[in-house]
Image: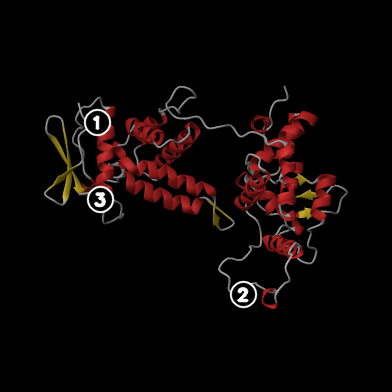
Amino acid sequence: MKVPKYRRYKEIYAKVVFPGRREIHLGPYDAPESRAKYDRLVAEFLANERKSPPPIRLATQRRVNDIAGVPSVLTVADLAVKYYEFAEGYYQKNGRPTGELCWVKYAMRHLLQLFADIPVNEFGPKQLKLARDKMIEQGLARKTINQRTQKIVRCFKWGVSEEFVKPEILQALKSVDGLRAGRSAARESEKVRPVSVEHIEAIRPYMNPIPMAVVDLLLLTGARVGEITSMRTCDVDSSQDQWIFTPESHKTDYTGKRRYIPLGRKGMAIVSKYLKPDEPTSYIFQPREAMAIRKEVLRMNRKSRVQPSQVDRSKPDARRKPGERYVAFSIRQCIGRACEKAGIPAFHPHQIRHTAATEIRKKFGIELARATLGHSSAVTSEIYAELDL
């Protein structure tokens, strides 16, 4: 039995006809909403062993409650919008949205591709599995699919707490197990592996000294790249023989724990070059300083005479100027360009944290690796530190 086609109806509308002459109108022809509805109906048709879908209540049947201002028939799209508005206020750190908000948006996108117009209390495990199958078709990795599926369930959990969703809907969705390795069609992602110290040394001639100082500190301390790039003079306690760096903000701030990063002798030698005693709240590693070093090196290596018009080529109204601090992505870009010039496989800063964890575990054991990485449990440290066979 062939899959029913997306058809034109009365010139400006679209429809689909299922077996048994079950005809469903989709809305305006070639509109994103009608295409999404067609995709959902076909997915349910295939999942239901090619049987015609039962009648459903359309979103046009909704009535607005004048008192509460909430649709009496709340759709999945309505719930997703309300949850995202909640997430915008919840996933905040230092007045800026965290990366979790972006992952919530991606998860909601998969949900709305198929089920935007159905009532929330008609959404169940079958629909959740269809959304998951859509992710598999798009080529997402198994772990990513499981994470986004959990965020969809979390959206309905929030809906239950706000009395938008019936509790039994949430219980039914929780019955859907995550995809297991080797037991689904989803592809497996590659595990993050440590990068060799030889490769780190290979990029040194092609790196600016300031980004390279960040890389060296990552290898020495096992810290996260965001922690090192946020280092300020006031965050470094240099009153003792052993300097301790306490980041103003870190990944697990919400747990109420403080993060302490000992720099060690080599780390102290690196940081002391870039400390700014006169500006204790300024960031230690600044792109503007790296740009100045780059221009100085280019000027020194110049073979032709500098023309008077080329003495100062800075643009006072430039659209893009060097920022006051590095971010994780900019350090990754620097490393990627250096790897390309060095002719070695590209690696990213997070792999350096794995390298540091592996070296610390090899020399001092898993407990010290746990303390250095800032983990509450050694089980988490096992993810970063490779076992020394």
Look at discs 2 and 3 and give the one toward the viewer: 2
State left or right for residue 129 relative to residue 359.
Answer: left
Q: Residue at x 62, y 41 (%)?
A: 346
Of 81 and 143, which appears nearest the observer? 143
- Does residue 75 lie above or below 300 as drawn? above
Which label's residue is closer to the chain start, 2 or 1?
1
Q: Amino acid at mark 3?
A: Ala
Q: Which residue is mark 1?
A: 45
Q: Which mark is residue 316?
A: 2
Q: Residue at x 26, y 27 (%)?
A: 48
State left or right for residue 99 relative to residue 154.
Answer: right
Q: Is residue 270 visible?
A: yes
Percent x, y of residue 249: 65, 52
Q: Quadrant of the N terminus?
A: top left
Mark 2 surroundings: few (<14), some (14-19) or many (≥20) residues within 10 A? few
Look at discs 3 and 1 and give the one toward the viewer: 3
Q: Secondary structure at mark 1?
A: helix
**Residue at the extreme front of the image, as rendered:** 304
Q: Secondary structure at mark 2?
A: loop
Which label's residue is closer to the chain start, 2 or 3?
3
Q: Residue at x 45, y 22 (%)?
A: 183
